[in-house]
Amino acid sequence: MSIKNIGILTSGGDAPGMNSAIRAVTRLAIEQGINVWGIKRGYIGLRTGDIIEMNLRTVSDILHRGGTILYSSRDKEFKTEKGIKDAVEVCKKNKLDAVVVIGGNGSLKGVKDLMDNGIRCIFIPATIDNDVSSTSYCIGFDTAMNTGVEMVDKLRDTARSHDKCSVVEVMGRKCGDIALNIGIAVGATAILVPEVEYDFQRDVIKRIKYTQNIGRRHFIVVIAEGCEKTMEIASQIQIETGVQARFTILGHVQRGGSPTLRDRVLASTMGMKAVKTLIEDSESRAIAVKCDRVVTYGIEESLNLKKQFNIDLYKEALKISI
């Protein structure tokens, strides 16, 4: 099938590196003689027809910028039968042969809905939580981790100066990858993730008291947001150990900022793979990273794969974080 027009959109939470993917898709597609149309604000723009023509200059000087130049959203209306029908009509009206969707799990489910209604799609995983099951890496993950490490390092200065415990909540509602990696990088005394059931006395208090006994006076505890109770944990640490504890929720600061080299390169590589897949394959596909290679999966297969938490790394991390 000859590809003449494609749309591109970013959906869900923004992730550093989305702009790099937009740039790569746009430039390689145009180089291949394909017209590119930018769809603003994700599936909202796809439903309402908020579409602009992209050219080489549209994507100039965006590699270093966080967020997304096409803006993003979470659209409840798109999940309805009417919402999907409206999006399909916009695709037909604008003669879009395919749509490239950049986003997380919710965006991937939207791709399935479009595909089931005759719209060919290519999905590029971009979410700082790194929780898309079919890929070992999502755009934005590296930047979010580096931002988190920078913030915790600053908190450590105060914790060390006052012999405090800094309890830090990082993003990751259902996936503890950010918490695990940041915890290792900052030498956290305890790391709590949603994939591993924890015992507060054993996994937090006992570890802090043990390190107290061998001379440590300040502590870092990293918690994924999916574990909740961050404030309560900080309060209980202070009561049971006598160490003054303060909690910090990093929140959306992890979403912003200039993407790291890794995010820029992988996002660009995924974007180019998306265009090549459009040209070489007639099916809807999901771009993924597997064993450090950029590959593709069928949409159904991608949705059915299960995310594997690195429990071995988690166990090893606890051995050295004392």
Image (tube, grey):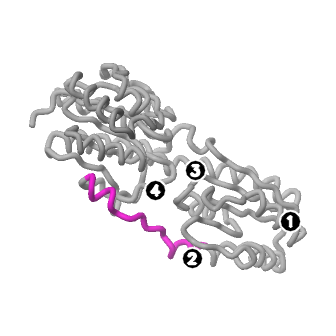
Q: Disc 1 residue type?
A: Gln
SS assignment for the magenta stretch, majority: helix
Kindly indicate whether the residue at mark 2 contacts the one at mark 1 (C-beta within 8 angstroms).
Answer: no
- How packed mark 1 is, by other alpha carbons closer than 10 Å (few <14, some 14-19, many 20 or more), is some
Which quarter of the rendering shows the C terminus? bottom right
The residue that label 1 is drawn on is 238
The residue that label 2 is drawn on is 316
Q: Disc 4 residue type?
A: Asp
Q: Disc 3 residue type?
A: Asn
Residue 48 at what x, y percent from top left?
Answer: 37, 23
Task: Tell me the element at label 4.
Answer: loop
Along the line of sight, the residue nearer the viewer: 175 or 253: 175
Q: CA distance from mark 4 to mark 1?
A: 33 Å
Q: Earlier in the sequence, mark 4 or mark 1?
A: 4
Asked if residue 308 lies left or right of residue 200, the reply is left
Splitting the image into 4 quarters, where does residue 58 fall?
top left
Asked if residue 161 lies left or right of residue 312, the reply is right
Q: Earlier in the sequence, mark 3 or mark 4?
A: 4
User: Is 306 a magenta residue?
Assistant: yes
Asked if residue 66 lies left or right of residue 108, the reply is right
Q: CA distance from mark 3 to mark 1?
A: 28 Å
Q: CA distance from mark 3 to mark 4?
A: 17 Å
The residue that label 3 is drawn on is 146
Q: CA distance from mark 3 to mark 2?
A: 21 Å
- Please state the extent of the stretch shown in magenta in the rendering: 299-317
Q: Is residue 199 above or below residue 244?
A: below
Residue 195 at what x, y percent from top left?
Answer: 54, 68
Q: Disc 2 residue type?
A: Glu
The residue that label 4 is drawn on is 131
**Which numbered disc, 3 or 1, marks the residue closer to the eye?**
1
Q: Earlier in the sequence, mark 2 or mark 4?
A: 4
